[in-house]
Amino acid sequence: MTTQNPEFSMGRIEFVGLIAMMTATIAFSIDAMLPALPEIAAELSPELAHRAPLILTAFVLGMGLGTFFSGPLSDAFGRRNVVFGGAALYSLSAFVAWMSNSLEVMLVARIFQGLGASGPRVVAVAIIRDLYQGREMARIMSVVMMVFALVPAMAPMLGAGIILTAGWRAIFIAFMAFSIISVVWMGLRLPETLPPENRRPLRARLIIGAVRELIGHRTVRLSILVQSLALAMLFSMIMLVQPIYDTVYGRGESFPLWFGGIAVVAASASLINALLVVRYGMRRLVSIAFGFQILLSGAMYFLNLGALPDPYGFAAFVFFQTCLFFQAGLTLGNLNAIAMEPMGHIAGMAASLVGAISTVLAALIASPVGLMFDGTTKPLALAMLVMAIAAYGMMLYMGRVENRQPAAAE
């Protein structure tokens, strides 16, 4: 295969497998925890069981903060160094979480675990960019994303299997093993892809300047805010979906199977988006998705569809969950593309900052939603409705901005 690095000799299948494993760290670290939430709540927070899902947003918050720096650090010190350092922090934090006897200690450990996971997440994309160009790069990215999309389907089942055989704390041992395997694989088979002569010094003024430019551009600013809301909706669902299956519908044992099946179905959204986006445009597809979400969330909340007699209430919620996951496939990629389109001159820095800002804001929005759970689906439906209305309104305003060229170029 043709790459920019003459010393690179790893086969394409092995390379895709390694990169997919590095990027899958995020999904595995979040979704494998879902079956463990009831036992974690019972052991570490029995009086305030609704706080257990915070271990998910704590990880996301740390990941978002780390994304600010992982890209620039890898540009300055090399890809391998950042991956190794991030993996070390991730594994050490997983060990602390494994040993923790309070939810507060576990939350802190999860924040640092997210910080560590941001290294492989960001650097994996940079490695692909180092080695491939043009259509070949797009092909590799597509295959990696296809493999990555399967992880949320399998992670809850894997987590449930670990809990069944070794208890919920063993999930953190699995995290450490997963990280160690990936970095050893990389250390043995993948050389440094960014030569010293191509590295860029780490300068705070460049990061500050990029932030100012992102925030100062009206369309980019709006797309980041909408992307934050889209992510917050996804994180809110992930935080509450297991308690809802367990407490509301009494289907806690079959939850991993339902979650996996829905994830596989929702993964088709990316393919559908690829077929429709050229014809209808990114902004229109995003607006349609949020408009549909307003109708669906409004029906779930005002008609209280989740409280219908079994199996109708459960079917309504499964449809609600599937549509939310499907919405993510129709919106997140398009919103990221809208934000990046005017930022081609600082693409690497902008990609890191857009991802970081939207992820941190989403975690901060989703955390209170996770605490609203009252044993029904109504708080989640209300939160989805409010966020969908806000996102739809911003998309309408973005359309007005884009129709006024001077304003859109700010």
Image (cartoon, helix red, strand yellow):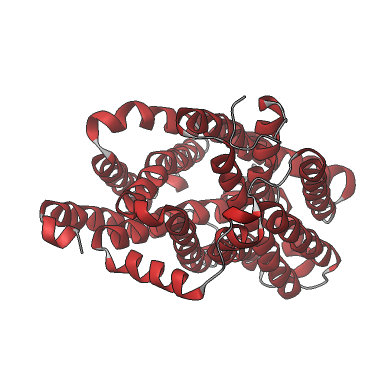
Residue at 23% in and 41% down: 284
| Whole-percent x, y for residue 65 in the image | 56, 67
In the displayed orientation, state which residue is furthest to the front: 197
Q: In the rendered view, would you say 39 is above or below 100?
A: above
Q: Considering depth in this image, is 122 or 97 the residue closer to the camera? A: 122
Q: Quadrant of the N terminus?
A: top right
Q: Considering depth in this image, is 270 or 169 the residue closer to the camera? A: 270
Q: Is residue 110 visible?
A: yes
Q: Considering depth in this image, is 92 or 341 the residue closer to the camera? A: 341
Marks counted in the figure total 0
Q: Dividing the picture into quarters, in which one does residue 210 lie?
A: bottom left
| Whole-percent x, y for residue 143 in the image | 56, 29
Residue at 30% in and 33% down: 277
Q: In the rendered view, would you say 315 is above or below 76?
A: above
State left or right for residue 177 relative to residue 259.
right
In the displayed orientation, state which residue is furthest to the right: 166
Q: Considering depth in this image, is 51 or 188 the residue closer to the camera? A: 188
Residue at 56% in and 45% down: 125
| Whole-percent x, y for residue 364 in the image | 49, 68
| Whole-percent x, y for residue 31 in the image | 65, 47
Q: Quadrant of the C terminus?
A: bottom left
Residue at 80% in and 55% down: 172
Q: Is residue 46 visible?
A: no
